[in-house]
Amino acid sequence: MDMPITGQTGGSTEAGPRPSDGGTESIRTLRRAVGLTQGELGKHVGVTRQTIAAVEKGDYAPSVYLALRISRRLGSTVEALFPLDKEPS
């Protein structure tokens, strides 16, 4: 299950850090390039249009599984769509 970013600490969630602005813009750009609406992409990957809109805006961090489904449907990679802000040391 995908979870919205709440800003609360503690407990476990499947959501990770927000995608960077570059990543979120890439999702919108690629989605439009392949001719899909937010609703159509949502149906292909098993979520609502609202979830896709929130991911594109950076308000929602998808689970690894959803990120993988989105990237595959758009012909990209998770790394390209959701780049890390910095590499771990």
Image (cartoon, rainbow, N blue to C red):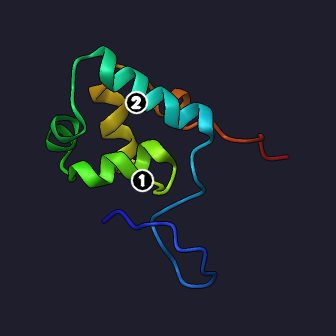
Q: Residue lying farthest right? A: 89
Q: Position of residue 69 (x, y in %)?
A: 30, 39
User: Taking 82 as reference, is 48 left or right?
Assistant: left
Q: Earlier in the sequence, mark 2 or mark 1?
A: 2
**What residue is shown with label 1?**
62
Which of label 2 and label 1 is nearer to you?
Answer: 2
Q: Secondary structure at mark 1?
A: loop
Pick the residue in front: 5 or 80: 5
Q: Quadrant of the N terminus?
A: bottom left
| Kind of residue at disc 2 | Arg
| Kind of residue at disc 1 | Pro
Q: Is residue 77 above or below residue 42?
A: above
Residue at 51% x, 37% y: name it: 24
Q: Is residue 17 above or below residue 68?
A: below
Q: Residue lying farthest top? A: 33
Residue at 22% x, 36% y: name it: 41
**What residue is shown with label 2?**
28
Q: Is residue 44 above or below residue 30?
A: below
Q: Position of residue 2 (x, y in %)?
A: 35, 62
Q: Secondary structure at mark 2?
A: helix
